[in-house]
């Protein structure tokens, strides 16, 4: 032991040390511990160093921490170190980090209140836990409920679930969810809605027994024990409730921030309702009993809505409205009683003021007198042996008496409601077993503890004793089962504390004795307690500073009780006279409350059932006095002790299951954990005691296989034997030296506390050493590989560097030599160039200097000689230039103004150019403007060039002038002498020269200015051009950008539209699938209800003794498919006689229907007669009004008709004449041909033939014209005759329509008449006669025949007539088209009505026979009513006329339709007869080859012609139909006879029989056969619905039968793949489209039955094969398991593997293929199979913490890959099955990926798109490392995931719906098998069928 301690308490070991705030803190050893050390050197988690002192006597070493791998376990007993800090830390980690509120602690379920609604109680969670072993799933209240339910069914022993905890811990909610689980998994057997009634009791009890406290908004202020009864099939049949210790004091007093019972506030919130006006209620703050807490509102609770829920629950439990109002009346009177004001009369008496309003209302509501109640509220009666005194009481006692009365009334009302709830939940069926749910207070201790806390803690002492004994018993059973030595475990026995309370002379006994004393008081009772127990009982103590309190040492803690109020609360006294006043009330319900229980009446009027004897009441049944006064004197303590004793007897007779509810904090903060409060409750509820008991023995228990798998790494190869048990023993003896630390059981190894941690440390050290060695080896290998790579790289680098250096040296030497040569030639070239440049420079300088000097001389001479000429010329030029400048300035100014305006316009254009459309419009205009500007620039350039030319001209003229001046100078030199002589002239000349020089300078300046202006203008123009170019470029760029933007937007819109289209398509597909799924679910629900109806019908038939019916034929015309009106087959006639009752009921129903229809017909006839009379009256008025118009119209039309008649006769005579002339002309032509003059090919012949053809065409046109005219005349005559002779009135709308049509005809005819009367056509007869005479002449002149264009005129006239006739024909055609459209609309409406009728028929298929006729009649009445209302609302006048016209039109259409149907049938029959005759004739003829003579003998050919004669039909007699159905459906076994049949043979046989019935046109036979087939398939599926082969066989045959009905229906869409012979086999007389829908529905039902059957087979395999079985051996090691894993209710019946699942899938696939199931249907079945596998696996993964590890993810991924391989082998990868596994694949990947950084979070979010956010977070929370090297997922990382997935729009549902069935479709799959080739095997016993 010391060596082990030294081994465990080493450096870096982690321990727990006590702490005042956190209770326990974690620390780490910084130095190894040695035996005898006085202190431990520790370091806290915050880095602070600490010395932990050790007591050398006790050696109080701190508790060791469990390895991190064990933290967060589902079961606290799985921890290696079982102590308080380990339990507290494990609960905190699960609650805070993993958000898990449930944890096992051995047999106890610890439930921590999250103060938040969690999605873990839905129907999907219930289904997931149903049928599972407790240890296999994560802790949950449903797991405890399932364990209790299983043990009840397996052991046939009653069960109890004990839910305890302090107020606000969640006891009521846990009990409620347990009851909900029982109500869900076990439906009621005989009575309807028993589960709803059981659950409906919760809102009732919460309203009258729950209240808001400072700790809980919905605190139960009473204890209750609910027994849920079950029958032998373990279905719920009823329930019974017992209540304990109602807190009556809350009715009259509430502390701050608390409320009274909810029902009072619900009443006040509903006071505005009309039914509550008589109660005279108001707000809650208006009443004393509901305003003391000063907080009448609970956040998030609507009291009015809760009141509605409570009332609905009352109704559901059979408490009707009258009783409810009675209850509410009593509750309201209690509130008014609390407001009764009592005043002092004197010191010893009190009085209630007269006419007190609230007391008056109280007396009115309670039905008592005001005087009696006011008197006895202020007085009491004292009885002695001889006399009776009435004594007034003071105000304080009167108020107490008032409050005591209110409490007593409420208690009686509470008990009455409980009794009637029990009566409503009572069942007449005998109870076989029950499960009890106990919801009672946990251990309580407050600052001031009184009588209520005493009773609660007393009950908890009894429950703790029972709990200890149960745990002790379980431990003993486990030890005995495993055959290990049993050693007595020392545990806390609280029997002394119980004796202190309930034994003789105990606390309760002394309290009852003190209550009997006349002057008993709390002080005297306290002194008796001190005298009796203070020195004799160690558990009883007296406080030091008080004489009115006592202390009891309970199992959980010491509690100090204050004696004040114990006697009063124990006696619970009520003034008997007040009770007598109430008993004398006129209010029946109030009187009933105070009667004995045996005399109580039920609110439903039913007497109490026998079950009342087994129900245990709050008050004991024994010793009950008939006098009510004695009942009031019975003490509360005695009642509670007796009730508690009965409760303990019940619990001891059941198997208990414990749920301990923990309140994590006092502030109701969600997921906030207060360690102090948690430890307090863990100690109080016995969880730590459970841990202590477990730790005292062998808490850790492993199976030999688990131990071997986990600690295989600690074994050597030689230690591994074939016997795993012996291997474990040998290894364990080597690892653990102390044999007391473990025991070897029969199937398990038992370890003491701490040994698993020791083994885990050895395993971790071994793995760590192995890891270090692996790391060392790998690092060595990596370093060596790196060194070799570096060495090779260095050598390579050296080689390349040396080569590079050598190449560089050679290159340097070559460059040096080349440089020297280049320098030599370069220096030579430089010197030579320099010399030549100097020489050339000297010559150039000389030349330039000489030229310069000559130019200077020339300039001087020129200036002197030409000064005068220059002045003259310059002045003229300046004048002209001034004019031009002015003109240019004006032009320039105009340009500037225009440019300014153009800029403004340009800005506007730029603004407009921002629009793409405007830019496109102005782009071409802008280019034109640019071209104009370019032209303007060119003009300016031309002008500049002209200016330059002018300047050049001026320069030239100037040069000429200079020459002239030189000549003048020469001349002046000649005259120099004259100048000398004339000095005066010289002076003037000098002045003139000077002036000329100045003028020249001015001229040069002006020239310079002009040149500057020209340059400036040119610069401005260039700048303007550049700006325009830039603007143009900008506009082009903007245009390109806009075009690009338009293209991008177009592309974006295109992509957006494509995405929207894709999404819409996907949405439509989803909607279609949802609609199919909804329809198929409705079919499933219909089938379930039908089965339930049949079962109930059978039960009723068996329960009621029906006399034996006689043999009679049924006259029903309803098919058994529950919808179609078909004839019953003889098979239906041979059913049991139980159907006679149905026939009688149907006949009665038919008679009632006949009477209803007869009544409806009479009503319709009356309505029709009234409408007819109204119509006649209106028609007479209309006829009188129209008669005058007709007379006038006749006179106007008479003359025209006569003229038209004459014209017609004239045209007919002309037509006859033309025909005669034509014949004569033909004869003359033939004579000419015979004579040879008109031989073919001659010109005369050709011309004559062309004219003859033209004449023929003209005659044809005339003929058509005559016919049209004749038809018009006839129609007009008929119309006129019809107008004159019309006697039958027609609707006004139709007459108007006909008048309109006649008017159009009249206008057309008048136009034609005018055309014919034109001069152009009046001469037509003479022209024709002349033409014919010319043609008849012996030698006609064909050239003169057409002179003057006569033929052309005739031709034009005929064309005009033709056009007019065509226009009239078009008008007639349009009117005809309009009528056709109207008829088509009517036909369309009739088709819609037909479709509605079909839908109604399909709906009626799903109704029972009794409801079909009523539903059809109701639908027809509704339809007619709606139509009538619509028409009547639109126009009442038109309504009646339209109705009559529609009725007549309907009758006409129906008659036409019947005639057409008869004609079609007749023609079909004739066609068949003719086809048969033709076949006979073809069969009788013999083919003769061309080379064969008639004399040769013909040898018969051996051809099986009889096979060719078969038409693919089977004939049977009507009486053989039952035999046919029996042999082909009912008695056909898929495993027997049907093995060797053609796939789908039964379907082919049935269809061939159906074809023959169709061929002979036997309607009754068709209906009877189809009805019998459908009924028989349903019957065989109901009988053998669990057999997969049977269901698969009939699914394949039903689909084949459906395909045959489609293939041979005659519809074109189904005949595309038929052969000609198959098209001949189509049905000819009947349209079975409605039956196709019925068969489709039947196929859907069979498919769903197949899926359920398949699911039942696969379900037990999935979890074991996909999750639990290790397909890859050695990957995952088993972690320690807790007690729950050991005590699962049902042992493993057999381990399934992945191979088992694949084998089963192969079996399913082979069976379906053998039965000939459609490939598409097989794909759908496989997809459903894989969905079930994926959904069940993922759901279990989400509910099993032990499965969420890296190694398990690897196992799952491998298993999924095997399933995918199976799909590839079967060529089913495209069926969508793989996609159904995507959530499971992503969950497996989520277990394997890194889960640390933000990048990992982003990768997880993008990867897990098939998982919901709740599923991802759940997997991350459940992720548990199997080895110490794995890291847990941090809370911060999980929050990061939640933040990233916050925007996802998805369902918050956690689990996948395992009951989901994908909507099935049956794609048309035609068969190529010829019906005439099918042979019927003799094994089917169908010899009575004849092939046709």
Image (cartoon, rainbow, N blue to C red):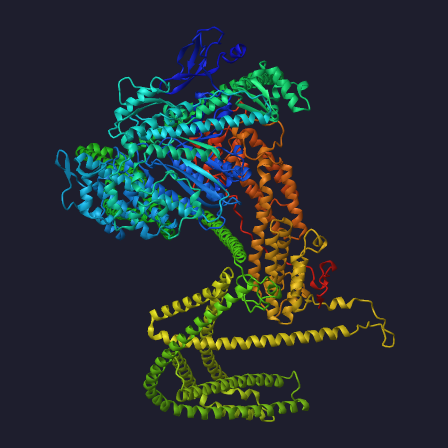
Image quadrant of residue 811?
Answer: top right
Is any atom of residue 174 visible in this view? Answer: no
The outermost residue toward the front is 386
State the residue at coordinates (64%, 84%): 1242
Residue nearest the viewer, comparing 896 with 1740: 1740
- Horizontal relation, residue 259 to residue 91: left or right: left
Q: Using residue 1841 as the reference point, say whether residue 219 is left or right of it.
A: left
| Front position in the image: 946 or 136 | 136
**In the picture shown, does residue 205 fall above or below 1641?**
above
Along the line of sight, the residue nearer the viewer: 1789 or 1106: 1106
Please, is residue 1694 above or below residue 283 in the view? above
Please state the horizontal and vertical placement of residue 328, each as a whole percent of the image.
29, 47
Quarter holding the C terminus is: bottom right
**Considering only vertical position in the picture, is 637 above or below 1237?**
above
- Name of the residue lying farthest toward the left: 346
Residue drawn at 38 percent across, 20 percent down: 23
Is residue 1771 shown to the viewer in this render? yes
Residue 1012: give x, y in percent of width and height. 28, 38
Total labels: the figure holds: 0
Viewer-proximal residue among 1886 and 966: 1886
To which quarter of the image does residue 1437 belong? bottom left
Q: x, y (%) of residue 1232?
A: 65, 90
Q: Is residue 1690 above or below residue 79?
A: below
Q: Position of residue 1051 (x, y in %)?
A: 45, 47
């Amino acid at each position: 032991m010391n060596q082990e301690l030294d081994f465990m308490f080493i450096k870096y070991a982690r321990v727990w040390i006590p702490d005042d705030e956190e209770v326990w803190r974690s620390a780490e050893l910084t130095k190894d511990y040695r035996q005898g050390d006085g202190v431990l050197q520790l370091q806290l988690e915050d880095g602070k160093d600490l010395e932990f002192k050790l007591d050398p006597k006790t050696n109080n070493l701190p508790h060791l921490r469990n390895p991190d791998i064990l933290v967060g376990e589902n079961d606290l007993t799985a921890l290696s170190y079982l102590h308080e800090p380990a339990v507290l830390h494990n609960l905190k980690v699960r609650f805070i980090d993993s958000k898990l509120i449930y944890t096992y602690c051995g047999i106890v379920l610890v439930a921590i209140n999250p103060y938040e609604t969690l999605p873990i109680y839905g129907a999907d969670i219930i289904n997931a836990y149903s049928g599972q072993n407790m240890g296999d799933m994560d802790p949950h209240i449903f797991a405890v409920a399932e364990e209790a339910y299983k043990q009840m069914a397996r052991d046939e022993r009653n069960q109890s679930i004990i839910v305890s905890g302090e107020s606000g811990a969640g006891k009521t909610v846990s009990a409620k969810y347990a009851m909900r689980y029982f109500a869900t998994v076990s439906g009621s057997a005989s009575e309807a809605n028993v589960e709803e009634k059981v659950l409906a009791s919760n809102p009732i009890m919460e309203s009258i027994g729950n209240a808001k406290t400072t700790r809980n908004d919905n605190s139960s202020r009473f204890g209750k024990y609910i027994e849920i009864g079950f029958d032998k099939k373990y279905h719920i049949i009823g329930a019974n409730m017992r209540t304990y210790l109602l807190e009556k004091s809350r009715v009259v007093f509430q502390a701050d921030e608390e409320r009274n019972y909810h029902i009072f506030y619900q009443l006040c919130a509903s006071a505005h309702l009309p039914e509550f006006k008589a109660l005279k209620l108001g707000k809650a703050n208006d009443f004393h009993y509901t305003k003391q807490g000063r907080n009448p509102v609970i956040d998030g609770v609507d009291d009015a809505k809760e009141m509605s829920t409570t009332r609905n629950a009352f109704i559901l439990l059979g408490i009707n409205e009258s009783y409810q109002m009675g209850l509410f009346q009593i509750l309201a009177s209690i509130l008014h009683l609390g407001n009764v004001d009592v005043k002092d009369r004197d010191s010893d008496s009190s009085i209630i003021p007269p006419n007190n309003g609230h007391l008056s209302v109280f007396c009115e509501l309670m039905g008592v007198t005001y005087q009696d109640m006011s008197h006895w509220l202020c007085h009491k009666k004292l009885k002695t042996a001889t006399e009776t005194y009435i004594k007034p009481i003071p105000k304080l006692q009167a108020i107490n008496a008032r409050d005591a009365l209110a409490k007593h009334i409420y208690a009686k009302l509470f008990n009455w409601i409980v009794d009637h709830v029990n009566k409503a939940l009572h069942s007449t069926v005998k109870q076989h077993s029950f499960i009890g749910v106990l919801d009672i207070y946990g251990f309580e201790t407050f600052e001031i503890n009184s009588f209520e806390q005493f009773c609660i803690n007393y009950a908890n002492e009894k429950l703790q004793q029972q709990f200890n004994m149960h745990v002790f018993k379980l431990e003993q059973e486990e030890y005995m089962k495993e055959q290990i030595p049993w050693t007595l475990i020392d545990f806390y026995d609280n029997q002394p504390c119980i004796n202190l309370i309930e034994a003789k002379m105990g606390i309760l006994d002394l309290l009852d004795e003190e209550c009997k004393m006349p002057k008993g008081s709390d002080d005297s009772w306290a002194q008796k307690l001190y005298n009796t127990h203070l020195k004799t009982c160690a558990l009883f103590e007296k406080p030091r500073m008080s004489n009115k309190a006592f202390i009891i040492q309970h199992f959980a803690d010491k509690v100090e009780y204050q004696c004040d109020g114990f006697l009063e609360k124990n006696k619970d006294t009520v003034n008997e006279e007040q009770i007598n006043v109430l008993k004398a009330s006129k209010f029946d319900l109030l009187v009933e409350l105070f009667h004995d229980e045996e005399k109580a009446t039920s609110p439903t009027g039913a007497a109490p059932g026998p079950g009342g004897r087994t129900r245990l009441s709050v008050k004991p049944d024994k010793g009950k006095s008939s006098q009510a006064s004695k009942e009031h004197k019975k003490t509360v303590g005695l009642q509670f002790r007796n009730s508690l004793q009965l409760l303990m007897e019940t619990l001891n007779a059941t198997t208990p299951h414990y749920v301990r509810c923990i309140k994590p904090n006092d502030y109701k903060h969600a997921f906030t954990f207060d360690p102090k409060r948690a430890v307090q409750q863990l100690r109080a509820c016995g969880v730590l005691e459970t841990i202590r008991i477990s730790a005292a023995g062998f808490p850790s228990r492993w199976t030999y296989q688990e131990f071997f798998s986990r600690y295989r790494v600690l074994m050597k190869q030689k230690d591994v034997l074939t016997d795993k048990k012996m291997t474990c023993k040998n290894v364990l003896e080597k690892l653990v030296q102390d044999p007391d630390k473990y025991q070897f059981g029969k199937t398990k190894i038992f370890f003491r506390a701490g040994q698993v941690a020791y083994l885990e440390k050895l395993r971790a050290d071994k793995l760590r050493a192995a890891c270090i060695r692996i790391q060392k080896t790998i690092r060595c290998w990596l370093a060596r590989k790196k060194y070799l790579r570096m060495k090779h790289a260095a050598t390579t680098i050296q080689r390349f560097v040396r080569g590079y250096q050598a190449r560089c040296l050679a290159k340097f030497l070559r460059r040096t030599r080349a440089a020297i040569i280049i320098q030599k030639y370069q220096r030579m070239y430089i010197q030579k160039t320099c010399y030549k440049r100097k020489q050339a420079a000297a010559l150039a300088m000389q030349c330039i200097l000489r030229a310069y000097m000559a130019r200077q001389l020339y300039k001087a001479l020129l200036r002197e000689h030409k000064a005068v000429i220059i002045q003259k010329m310059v002045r003229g030029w300046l004048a002209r230039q001034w004019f031009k400048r002015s003109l240019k300035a004006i032009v320039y100014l105009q340009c500037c103004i225009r440019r300014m305006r153009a800029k403004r316009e340009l800005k506007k254009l730029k603004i407009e150019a921002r629009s793409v459309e405007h830019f496109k419009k102005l782009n071409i205009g802008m280019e034109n403007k640019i071209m104009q500007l370019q032209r303007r620039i060119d003009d300016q350039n031309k002008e500049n060039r002209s200016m330059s030319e002018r300047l050049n001209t001026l320069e030239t003229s100037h040069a000429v002038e200079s020459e002239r001046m030189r000549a003048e100078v020469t001349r002046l030199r000649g005259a120099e002498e004259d100048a000398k002589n004339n000095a005066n002239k010289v002076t003037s000349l000098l002045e003139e020269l000077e002036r000329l020089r100045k003028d020249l300078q001015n001229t040069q300046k002006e020239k310079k200015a002009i040149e500057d202006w020209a340059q400036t203008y040119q610069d401005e123009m260039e700048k303007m051009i550049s700006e325009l170019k830039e603007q143009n470029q900008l506009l082009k760029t903007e245009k390109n950008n806009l075009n690009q933007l338009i293209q991008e937007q177009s592309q974006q819109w295109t992509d957006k539209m494509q995405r929207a289209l894709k999404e819409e398509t996907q949405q439509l597909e989803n909607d279609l699938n949802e609609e199919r799924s909804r329809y198929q679910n409705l079919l499933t629900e219909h089938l379930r209800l039908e089965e339930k109806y049949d079962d109930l019908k059978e039960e009723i038939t068996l329960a009621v003794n029906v006399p034996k019916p006689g043999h009679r034929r049924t006259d029903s015309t309803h098919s058994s498919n529950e919808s179609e009106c078909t004839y019953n087959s003889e098979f239906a006639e041979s059913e049991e006689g139980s159907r006679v009752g149905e026939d009688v009921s149907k006949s009665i129903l038919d008679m009632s229907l006949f009477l209803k229809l007869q009544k409806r017909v009479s009503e319709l006839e009356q309505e029709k007669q009234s409408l007819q009379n109204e119509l006649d009256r209106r028609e007479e008025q209309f006829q009188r009004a129209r008669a005058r118009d007709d007379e006038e119209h006749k006179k106007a039309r008479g003359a025209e008709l006569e003229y038209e008649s004459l014209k017609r006769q004239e045209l007919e005579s002309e037509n006859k004449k033309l025909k005669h002339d034509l014949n004569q002309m033909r004869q003359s032509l033939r004579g000419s041909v015979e004579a040879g003059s008109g031989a073919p090919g001659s010109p005369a012949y050709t011309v004559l033939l062309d004219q003859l053809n033209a004449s023929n065409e003209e005659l044809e046109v005339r003929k058509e014209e005559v016919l049209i005219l004749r038809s018009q005349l006839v129609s007009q005559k008929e119309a006129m005759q019809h107008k004159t002779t019309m006697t039958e009135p027609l609707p006004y709308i139709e007459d108007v329509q006909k008048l309109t049509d006649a008017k159009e005809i009249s206008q057309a005819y008048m136009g034609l008449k005018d055309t014919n009367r034109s001069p152009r056509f009046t001469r037509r007869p003479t022209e024709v006669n002349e033409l014919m005479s010319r043609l008849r002449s012996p030698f006609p002149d064909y050239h003169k025949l057409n002179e003057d264009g006569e033929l052309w005129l005739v031709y034009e006239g005929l064309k005009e007539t033709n056009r007019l006739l065509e226009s009239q024909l078009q008008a007639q055609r349009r009117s005809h088209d309009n009528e056709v459209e109207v008829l088509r609309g009517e036909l369309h409406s009739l088709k819609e009505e037909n479709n509605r009728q079909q839908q109604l028929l399909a709906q009626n298929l799903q109704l029972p026979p009794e409801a079909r006729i009523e539903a059809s009649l109701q639908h027809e009445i509704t339809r007619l009513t709606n139509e009538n209302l619509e028409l009547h609302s639109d126009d009442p006048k038109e309504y009646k006329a339209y109705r009559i016209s529609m009725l007549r039109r309907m009758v006409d259409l129906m008659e036409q339709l019947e005639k057409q149907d008869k004609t079609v049938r007749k023609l079909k029959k004739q066609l068949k007869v003719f086809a048969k005759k033709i076949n006979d004739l073809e069969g009788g003829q013999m083919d003769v080859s061309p080379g064969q003579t008639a004399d040769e003998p013909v040898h018969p050919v051996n051809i099986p012609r009889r096979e060719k004669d078969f038409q693919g039909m089977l004939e049977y007699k009507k009486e053989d139909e039952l035999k046919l159905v029996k042999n082909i459906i009912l008695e056909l076994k898929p495993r027997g006879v049907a093995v060797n049949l053609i796939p789908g043979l039964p379907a082919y046989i049935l269809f061939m029989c159906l074809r023959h019935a169709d061929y002979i046109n036997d309607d009754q036979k068709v209906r009877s056969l189809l009805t019998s087939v459908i009924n028989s398939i349903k019957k065989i599926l109901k009988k053998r619905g669990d057999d997969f082969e049977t269901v698969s066989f009939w699914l394949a045959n039903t689909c084949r039968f459906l395909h045959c009905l489609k293939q041979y229906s005659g519809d074109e869409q189904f005949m595309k793949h038929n052969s000609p012979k198959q098209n001949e086999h189509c049905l000819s007389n009947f349209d079975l489209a409605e039956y196709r829908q019925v068969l489709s529905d039947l196929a859907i039902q069979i498919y769903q039955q197949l899926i359920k059957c398949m699911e039942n087979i696969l379900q037990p395999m999935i979890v074991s094969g996909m999750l639990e079985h290790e397909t890859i051996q050695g990957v995952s090691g088993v972690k320690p398991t807790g007690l729950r894993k050991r005590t699962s209710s049902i042992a493993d019946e057999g381990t399934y593997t992945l191979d088992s699942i694949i084998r089963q899938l192969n079996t399913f696939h082979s069976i379906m293929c053998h039965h000939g199931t459609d490939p598409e249907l097989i794909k759908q079945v496989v997809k459903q199979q894989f969905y079930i596998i994926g959904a069940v696996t993922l759901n279990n993964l989400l509910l099993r913490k032990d499965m969420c590890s890296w190694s398990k993810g690897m196992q799952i991924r491998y298993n999924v890959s095997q399933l995918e391989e199976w799909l590839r082998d079967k060529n089913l990868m495209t069926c969508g099955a793989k996609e159904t596994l995507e959530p499971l694949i992503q969950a497996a990947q989520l277990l394997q990926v890194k889960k640390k950084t933000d990048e990992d979070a982003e990768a997880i979010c993008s990867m897990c798109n098939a998982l919901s956010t709740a599923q991802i977070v759940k997997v991350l929370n459940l992720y548990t490392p199997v080895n110490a090297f794995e890291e847990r997922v941090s809370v911060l990382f999980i929050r990061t995931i939640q933040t990233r997935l916050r925007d996802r729009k998805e369902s918050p549902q956690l689990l996948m719906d395992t009951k989901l069935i994908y909507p099935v479709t049956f794609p048309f799959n035609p068969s190529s098998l010829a019906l005439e080739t099918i042979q019927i095997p003799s094994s089917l016993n169908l010899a009575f069928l004849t092939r046709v």
